[in-house]
């Protein structure tokens, strides 16, 4: 079976990375709607291509439909021709491989190491470490006739120093598109809070410092993408990330394979994180961006195939699947039309712009590609007991605590289109928090956060810098 027919692994590298929140009260489940086709030609289409090639060459070849393994019989010439085509498909499949060298380390580290991994185009990888820490976060209250009970509910803190990466080759194999999420986070405090209600036990209120960066870039094979974080709310505040991507350019012999998975991928935008605890974002700040429209392989081929209508005897030999086109290398009818389209599509999507985001003592240097959303989120996330519901039954009642997340920090979400960056931001801060005792609340002690929110929209021209009155600064590199 040729390497081009080996289905790439579609592992979930994001898991909790990129979810935005690090404090969970239930199991996080990704609501991803991504469609990420791989440059993969199903074996049944390989069989159809082999038989069609044999018919066009006037040789005898019959393949069994029970593959794999791929079994065939026919004339000597037909078998040899099929083996040559399979060798080309195997070579093309192996050429889809991308070698990644990823380095993530704090500034000044003397023992930093790089992770080397090999992916196929469209595959994902998680580099670094993740940690899950359980805590007693809430109570599930049940009340019946004459009695009630409060069942402890565990939450989890998901933290670590890691980067989730997805990679695609460009159709000519000369560059690699990289999209990633860097998550630097740690548990900074776990406070025991006594509600003062004999029917409830102690609550644990975690605090997590974090920086989360969504970025992207197109690297010529062998080049490096760098990302820097300074002033993160962590024990080690300064971090460097480097990503080097290497792949093989196309070197077709008798057949050419176009890897179009990058164009056809329908990617999710980063999740929008809310500041919580009484702060509500305006509608335009709470919406997720619309990402680039995918370019389906079937639609692209349909435009080309229109020129072959009415010429059935001279129709081109090809195989087609989401994210890949296979055709003879010398068929200028196909490649003469397809190559200019692929070149134009790559140019439209390859523009990579350096950005710098600075706010509240945190500075991040990242990159973003044309039309794809990038974001920077930094601050401290914690929980607070902000009130109580009351469950009532005959001759019984019990207080049900209300625990909410509180995020103090900022979020910038934006994208570069043409020669400008556009987007939005929010900055949330908490003033001194008051605690009311049970004798004032009756049901139990509560936290009373005092919070401030600044929101705004962004529009920055290439080569310019914008500073907001709220203390946010964004600069966009020259295009």
Image (tube, rainbow, N blue to C red):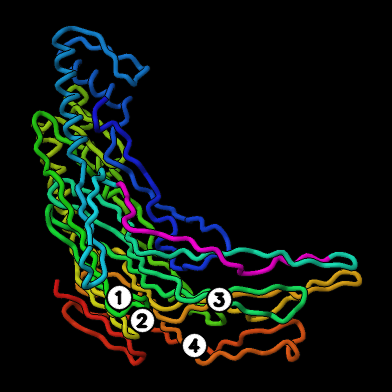
Relative to 336, say whether 33 is above or below. Answer: below
Residue 338 image position (x, y, % from top left)? 16, 43
- For the residues labelled 4 and 3, the Cα–Cα distance comes to 13 Å
- Residue at disc 3, secondary structure: strand
The nearer-to-camera label among 4 and 1 is 4
Left or right of 62 on screen, residue 187: right
Q: Secondary structure at mark 4?
A: strand
On the question of residue 136 being in view, the answer is yes
Q: Which residues are magenta?
A: 123-143
Residue 274 forms part of the magenta stretch: no
Residue 341: x percent and y percent? Answer: 17, 49
Q: Say whether marks 2 and 1 touch (CB < 8 Å).
A: yes
Residue indicated by mark 4: 430
Q: Position of residue 252 (x, y in %)?
A: 10, 35
Dot 1: what SS? Answer: strand
Residue indicated by mark 2:
457
| Magenta span includes 134 | yes
The residue that appears at 46% across and 63% down in the rendered structure is 158
Earlier along the polypeptide chain: callout 4 or callout 3? 3
Q: Earlier in the sequence, mark 4 or mark 1?
A: 1
Q: CA distance from mark 1 to mark 3?
A: 32 Å
Give me the residue at 57% from left, 82% from top. Answer: 278
Q: In the image, what residue occupies the spot 67% across and 90% down? A: 436
Name the residue carrying label 1.
422
Disc ID at residue 205: none
SS for dot 2: strand
> Which circle, 3 or 2, is nearer the viewer?
3
Residue 383: image tag: 3
Upstream in the sequence, badge 3 or badge 2? 3
């Amino acid at each position: 079976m040729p390497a081009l027919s080996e289905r790439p692994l579609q592992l979930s590298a994001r898991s909790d990375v990129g979810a935005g929140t690090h404090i969970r009260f239930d199991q996080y489940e990704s609501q991803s709607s991504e469609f990420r086709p791989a440059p993969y030609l199903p074996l049944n289409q390989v069989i159809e291509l082999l038989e069609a090639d044999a018919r066009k060459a006037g040789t005898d070849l019959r393949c069994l439909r029970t593959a794999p393994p791929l079994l065939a019989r026919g004339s000597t010439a037909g078998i040899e021709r099929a083996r040559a085509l399979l060798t080309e498909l195997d070579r093309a499949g192996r050429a889809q491989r991308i070698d990644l060298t990823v380095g993530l380390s704090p500034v000044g580290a003397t023992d930093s190491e790089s992770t080397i991994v090999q992916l196929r185009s469209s595959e994902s990888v998680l580099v670094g470490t993740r940690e899950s820490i359980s805590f007693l976060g809430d109570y599930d209250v049940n009340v019946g006739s004459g009695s009630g009970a409060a069942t402890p509910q565990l939450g989890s803190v998901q933290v670590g120093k890691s980067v989730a990466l997805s990679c695609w080759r460009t159709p000519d194999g000369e560059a690699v598109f990289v999209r990633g999420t860097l998550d630097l986070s740690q548990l900074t405090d776990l406070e025991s809070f006594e509600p003062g209600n004999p029917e409830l036990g102690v609550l644990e209120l975690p605090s997590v410092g974090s920086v989360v960066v969504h970025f992207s870039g197109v690297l010529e094979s062998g080049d490096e993408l760098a990302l820097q974080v300074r002033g993160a709310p962590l024990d080690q505040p300064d971090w460097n990330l480097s990503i080097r991507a290497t792949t093989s350019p196309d070197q077709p012999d008798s057949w050419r394979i176009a890897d179009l998975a990058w164009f056809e991928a329908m990617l999710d935008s980063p999740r929008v994180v809310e500041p919580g605890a009484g702060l509500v974002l305006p509608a335009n700040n709470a919406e997720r961006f619309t990402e680039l429209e995918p370019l389906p392989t079937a639609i692209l081929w349909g435009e080309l195939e229109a020129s072959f209508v009415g010429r059935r005897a001279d129709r081109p030999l090809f195989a087609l699947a989401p994210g890949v086109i296979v055709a003879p290398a010398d068929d200028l009818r196909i490649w003469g039309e397809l190559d200019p389209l692929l070149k134009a599509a790559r140019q439209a999507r390859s523009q990579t712009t350096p950005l710098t985001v600075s706010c509240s003592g945190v500075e991040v240097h990242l990159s973003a590609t044309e039309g794809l959303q990038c974001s920077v989120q930094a601050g401290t996330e914690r929980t607070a007991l902000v009130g109580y519901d009351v469950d009532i039954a005959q001759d019984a009642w019990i207080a049900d605590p209300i625990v909410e997340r509180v995020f103090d920090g900022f979020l910038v979400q934006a994208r570069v289109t043409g020669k400008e960056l556009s987007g939005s931001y929010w900055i949330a801060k908490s003033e001194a928090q008051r605690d009311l005792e049970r004798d004032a609340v009756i049901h139990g002690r509560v936290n009373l956060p005092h919070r401030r929110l600044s929101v705004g929209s962004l529009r920055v021209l290439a080569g310019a810098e914008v500073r907001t009155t709220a203390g946010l600064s964004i600069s966009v590199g020259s295009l």
